[in-house]
Image (cartoon, helix red, strand yellow):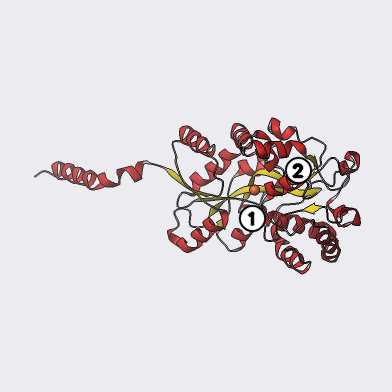
């Protein structure tokens, strides 16, 4: 047998042996664990596959449950990217060492630094404001345009405020921002007055607070703005739509630092096996058309200034200023916030 025919036979044997693995060799992929479960996200995955040829595999679930899964799967965790809501949550994942740096000049150029976590281990993909909703029969509209979170500890709001429990990360992040701006001892004092103004024991989610204001159980509530978008859109039913139409929205602290801004965001997991694809996917989420798609379905604010909020959200008003706090501070100040909320008796 000549050398050439031996080489030929070996090559044939090599390709036969390789055959079962051909799929995984040729198919680039990225694996996502996401706490966003919008049907509309499927379009984003498809669009990414069309543009890059990289297949997107995804698992949806509650943020905390997915993080527990990531921890228990350890090195075998197939996920490259974890997407969840609230800088407080992203900060916890980072602090426990599960994220790695997202190396991308594109992101560094495109994104305001306040939306990038420490060492670029997570970034914001959309913004959410924690706003005040109120009964227009109970308050003067002009006064409400100038309201601040700080005002809500005053006697004027006795038995008027509805809000969800202190175990909720949105509230913890809001208090973390107050601690950052006003210090611990002032916030402690403020919390005492604020909690004593609750109209009822904290209960329900943000939408339940809007319902409480619309149907007279409270005069005012604090909620994430996008729930109003969901309710006004009619997607959550007629009852919620008419409730959201009854109430008015105030963006607090317009006269000073601005409304509390939080994010939903993404990070690349430390055991990612498709790092480059993960970077590409996160960059893709910041493309203008993808931002438009995200916010027209979630009613969040775009994280990129060149994209307009959805028309439903524009209806909430444009008389606001954004708190320019770096969102990592919401994580850094989270343990203090939890302690102070607990001590104030916020259930
Ligand atoms: Fe939410």
Question: What residue is drawn where x is 49% and y is 44%?
Answer: 277
Q: Would you identify the image quadrant in which residue 194 lies?
A: bottom right
At label 2, counting other C-alpha atoms closer than 10 Å, the crowd grade (few under 14, some 14-19, many 20 or more) is many
Left or right position of 257 against 52: right
**Residues at marks 1 and 2 touching, judged by CB atoms closer than 8 Å:** no
Q: Position of residue 280 (x, y in %)?
A: 53, 42
On screen, residue 302 versus residue 1, left or right, reads right
Q: How many marks?
A: 2
Q: CA distance from mark 1 to mark 2?
A: 43 Å
Front position in the image: 323 or 227: 227
Rate crowding at label 1 as few (under 14), some (14 to 19) or many (20 or more) other CA atoms within 10 Å.
few
Mark 1 vs 2, N-terminal side = 1
Label 1 sits on residue: 119
Would you say residue 260 is visible in this rendering? no
Residue 107 image offset from top left, x and y in percent? 62, 43
Q: Residue at x 61, y 51 (%)?
A: 122
Q: Which numbered circle lies on residue 214?
A: 2
What residue lies at 23% left-to-right and 48% top-to-bottom?
Answer: 17
Q: Secondary structure at mark 1?
A: helix
């Amino acid at each position: 047998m000549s050398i050439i025919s031996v080489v030929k036979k070996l090559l044939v044997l090599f390709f036969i042996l390789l055959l079962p693995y051909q799929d995984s060799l040729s198919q680039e992929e990225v694996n996502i664990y996401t706490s966003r479960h919008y049907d509309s996200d499927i379009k984003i995955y498809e669009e990414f596959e069309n543009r890059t040829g990289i297949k997107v595999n995804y698992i949806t679930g509650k943020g905390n449950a997915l993080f527990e899964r990531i921890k228990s799967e350890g090195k075998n965790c197939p996920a490259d990217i974890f997407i969840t809501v609230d800088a407080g949550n992203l900060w916890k994942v980072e602090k426990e060492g599960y994220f790695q740096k997202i190396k991308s000049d594109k992101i560094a150029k495109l994104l305001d630094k306040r939306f990038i976590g420490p060492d670029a281990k997570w970034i914001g993909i959309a913004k959410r404001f924690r706003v005040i909703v109120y009964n227009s029969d109970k308050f003067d509209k002009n006064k409400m345009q100038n309201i601040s979170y700080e005002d809500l500890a005053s006697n004027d709001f006795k038995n008027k405020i509805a809000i969800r429990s202190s175990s909720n990360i949105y509230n913890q992040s809001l208090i973390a921002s107050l601690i950052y701006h006003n210090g611990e001892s002032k916030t402690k004092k403020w919390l005492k007055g604020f909690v004593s103004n609750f109209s009822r024991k904290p209960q329900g989610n943000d939408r339940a607070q809007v319902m409480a204001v619309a149907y007279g159980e409270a005069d005012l509530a604090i909620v994430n703005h996008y729930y109003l978008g969901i309710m006004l859109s009619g997607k959550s039913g007629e009852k919620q739509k008419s409730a959201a139409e009854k109430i008015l929205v105030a963006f607090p602290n317009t006269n000073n630092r601005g409304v509390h801004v939080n994010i939903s965001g993404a990070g690349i997991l430390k055991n990612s096996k498709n790092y480059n694809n993960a970077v590409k996917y996160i960059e893709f989420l910041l493309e203008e058309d993808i931002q438009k798609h995200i916010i027209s379905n979630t009613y969040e604010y775009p994280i990129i200034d060149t994209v307009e909020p959805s028309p439903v959200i524009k209806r909430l008003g444009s008389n606001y200023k954004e708190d320019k706090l770096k969102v990592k501070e919401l994580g850094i100040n989270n343990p203090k916030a939890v302690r102070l909320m607990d001590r104030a008796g916020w259930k």
